[in-house]
Image (cartoon, rainbow, N blue to C red):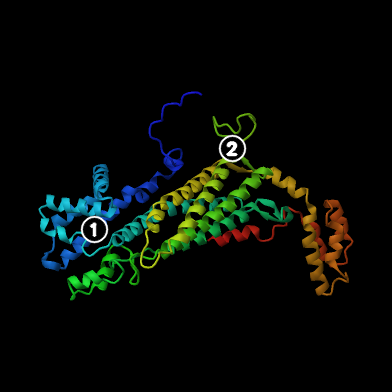
Amino acid sequence: MSPLPPPLPPQPLSPLDGRYRAAVSELGEHLSEAALNRARVRVEVEWLIALTDRSLFGSTPLTASHKDALRTLVSDFGQPEIDELATLEATTRHDVKAVEYFLRSRLRELGLERLEELTHFACTSEDINNLAYALTIDAAIAQVWLPRYRALIARLEAFAREQREQPMLAHTHGQPATPTTVGKEFAVFAYRLARVADQIEAVKPLGKFSGATGTFSAHVVAEPSVDWPELARSFVESLGLRFNPLTTQIESHDWQAELYQRVSHAGRILHNLCTDVWSYISIGYFTQIPQPGATGSSTMPHKINPIRFENAEANLELASAILDSLAATLVTSRLQRDLTDSTTQRNIGVGLGHSLLAIDNILRGFDELAVNPARLAEDLDDNWEVLAEAIQTVVRAEISAGRSSIADPYALLKELTRGNRVGRAELAEFITGLDIGADAKERLLALTPATYTGLASALVDELG
């Protein structure tokens, strides 16, 4: 038996932290463990300032310089702080307690030892965590994910406008159908995605700050005269979050479930976009622009594989699997608290990372895509039978107006075209022999598959 090779140096386990890091690294600024700890420090610092601003428990308001020094712990948070917290957690075996000890040490350095016991005052870990997660998730969506998603929508809208007049044979059930335009079909996707973007943007993070079981019990015992719910509301809102007044130990995560469901929904629309683009490429409606030095197949030199859209499909499936799981599990907590959400929420960045990677691939894929007007025209000219719908509809209108005595126009067209290939000459002969008015006959004789696109071009204007 051959000896085992020597072990590799430490390697990233996830492709998001390895092969695809460049495409998703911005999310790490918000959804990494380090970013979560930075947000925890922010919440602890702001709570301490809120208590001292109200001169509670013998404290006095901090000076402006002391407030600045404490807030600098957040703005200057970097590798030394990351390492220090890791060392503390190795002893505490508790991530939030490590943050508390970290802040206590900084208070001592600032000569503010008297405030140590107000650090993490009356808080359960979830009071800190739920606000920290809300801050980081909200920032990740607003500053990274949504801008990239909206950039893709803008790209689709531009493509739709560029191709608004380009006729294309439609396919319903995979069969030739009433023609459309390339632009109108991609306007449909842009419209769908923009609608979901607005829904995602409308999801507002909630925060709780009410103690071990959501009752403010320790707060009231410590100081009965304070309106703790109002103070908690004011504090949560000062962080830019909405206050949730009715919770258990945890904020119930419903807003997170709503967010992940909508991001997953957006991903499924994008998945549909990818499969359509892949199909258009496969039938030659779109061509791919060769990239210098790129290889499509290891053995077939002629190939340009639609890898951007295939990669996006796979990443969208992974994203939905994770985000759907998050949405399903986070809304359940046994009685007043269990810890399943702690493990689950550590994968938020993974779900959004696969989604962001898919968006990046689709954007890059469109940059390597070209419409093939010749192939589109060829397919339209090969399918004159799609005008059967137009002919039988005009005949119905003529019958209704008393200008035709044809008994069953649908059956008449069905006999002519169903399962048959019919060309320009056959249709012209058929139309010429119809018992309909001269104006109607003239309109039908002038019609071609390429001009039978209705209001497809004008509908692109619905994008606004």
Asked if residue 260 lies left or right of residue 432, the reply is left
Kind of element beneath mark 1: helix
Please state the horizontal and vertical placement of residue 124, each as a whole percent of the image.
27, 62
Label 1 Cα neighbours within 10 Å, binned few <14 / some 14-19 / many ≥20: many
Instruction: Give the residue displayed 10% in from the left and 59% down from the top.
Output: 114
Residue 192 visible in the current orientation: yes
Residue 443 visible in the current orientation: no
Q: Which of 182 and 67 is in front in this view?
A: 67
What amino acid is found at the position of numbered circle 1 in the picture? Glu
Relative to 284, say whether 125 is above or below: below
Please state the horizontal and vertical placement of residue 62, each as a whole percent of the image.
13, 60
Q: Nearer the viewer, residue 280 or 119?
A: 119
Determine the residue located farthest toward the bottom in the rendered image. Answer: 225
Relative to 264, say whether 58 is above or below: below
Label located before the other in sequence (2 or 1): 1
Q: Residue 26 carries which label?
A: none
Kind of element beneath mark 2: loop
Disc 1 marks which residue? Answer: 44
Relative to 317, say whether 393 is above or below: below
Disc 2 marks which residue? Answer: 289
Cα–Cα span, label 2 and label 1: 53 Å
Please state the horizontal and vertical placement of residue 445, each as a whole percent of the image.
81, 58
Asked if residue 231 lies left or right of residue 144, the reply is left
Instruction: Give the residue displayed 68% in from the left and 55% down from the top.
Output: 180
Q: In the rendered structure, are the residues bearing label 2 and label 1 in contact, judged by CB atoms less than 8 Å apart? A: no
Asked if residue 159 lies left or right of residue 227, the reply is right
Q: Write down the quadrant of residue 130 in the picture.
A: bottom left
Please state the horizontal and vertical placement of residue 81, each as a whole percent of the image.
24, 45
Q: Write down the quadrant of residue 129 in the picture.
A: bottom left
Relative to 7, say whether 200 is above or below: below
What amino acid is found at the position of numbered circle 2 in the picture? Ile
Instruction: Give the residue displayed 43% in from the left and 52% down from the top.
Output: 145
